[in-house]
Amino acid sequence: MGTSAKLLITLAGTCAVLGLSLGVASAATYVTSWGADPGPGQLRSPHAVAIDAAGDVYVADTNHDRIAKFTSDGGFLRAWGGGEYPDPSRLLGPQGVAVDTRGNVYVANTATYQIKKFTSDGQFLRSWRIRGGPHSRNAHQPFDVAVAGRHVYVTDKHHSRVDVFTSGGRFLRVFGHGGAGRGEFHLPCCVAVNPRNGRRVYVTDTGNSRIEKFTRNGRFLRAWGSKGSGRGQFNQPQGIAVDADGRVYVADDDNGRIEKFTAGGKFRGAWGSEGSGPGQFEHPRGVAVDAHGNVYVADTGNDRIEKFSQP
């Protein structure tokens, strides 16, 4: 089984997923999943997940062109985004979603080059386009979004950069450009911010198979990871999340697992394997952590959200 052995144990309907790697163990217990069954909460290719202060779950239901909102155990609450042009609340292929401390919801509406902002019950507030800078006429394509205080961070995947805005959409700065050096990106997918103080920004530098860490002003701090399937390696890293204690979780897409690290990039374990059973994944592309340490994964290929607890 190489350097990383995974064990799936099912006892009395409860699935414990253990990642055992060279003596470093991380355990996550499968709790529940939802989205695959027919009904108003059915999902189709969900790409991202976010949690608000009350514990409600927001999902970028990409191929349904909407945001779907659930309770923490998967109870469907509402959905929005299915309007027709020129309805400003209309969504088209949303890839990323984030929630601020006031409950406002930010959506990376990738297909229309926009960030859209809503209330927690889906009322449209405003939108803005992602451009190459405050004076550029060239629209760029947002892929993911994260919020810390009044700052909104957006990954512009195909232009290998992160744009920073105020919560009202005013452009502030940009950091990163194409390459494989320190602070450079190749097809950066997703972004997360430390929820405790907003001072550290983490980016999945997908094309370079690594995670990069920055200050909130875009100064490069460190990077970790390489291409592969061993501990701390990645094969198409996608979604990223940071918990209240600074631990970092990465959706390692093509390896079908979630990896967990310290804030400084030290590997702490992994769980999951490819498949459609409890605790398995088919291209996991989004991850979020709630205030209690529960981990939610957008299991994109299986059209569902999976929830895990941690000890």
Image (cartoon, rainbow, N blue to C red):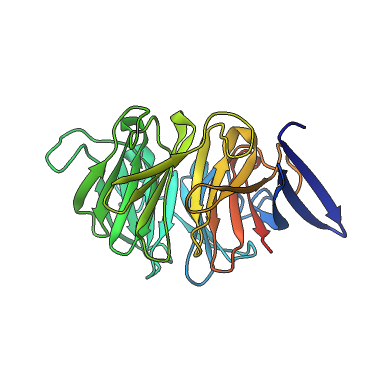
Give the vertical position of 29 relative to 282 (above or below).
Answer: below
Q: Give how far across and how far down residue 310 sits, in percent.
A: 67, 61
Q: Is residue 295 left or right of residue 59?
A: right
Q: Give how far across and how far down residue 271 sits, in percent.
A: 68, 46
Residue reaching furthest to the right: 12
Residue 111 or residue 167, whichever sits in front: 167
- Which quadrant does the N terminus fall into? top right
Give the vertical position of 124 relative to 153 (above or below).
Answer: below
Residue reaching furthest to the front: 23
Image point (43%, 63%), residue name: 195
Image point (69%, 50%), residue name: 37
The picture quadrant where one finds residue 92 is top left
How many marks the image carries: the answer is: 0
Q: Give how far across and how far down residue 88 sits, in percent.
A: 30, 52
Quick check: can you spot residue 81? Answer: no
The picture quadrant where one finds residue 177 is top left
Quick check: can you spot residue 57? Answer: yes
Image point (37%, 55%), residue name: 200
Q: Is residue 146 left or right of residue 30?
A: left
- Which quadrant does the C terminus fall into? bottom right
Give the vertical position of 311 relative to 236 (above or below).
Answer: below
Residue reaching furthest to the left: 135
Residue 154 or residue 67, whichever sits in front: 154
Residue 136 or residue 243, whichever sits in front: 243
Q: Is residue 227 left or right of residue 116?
A: right
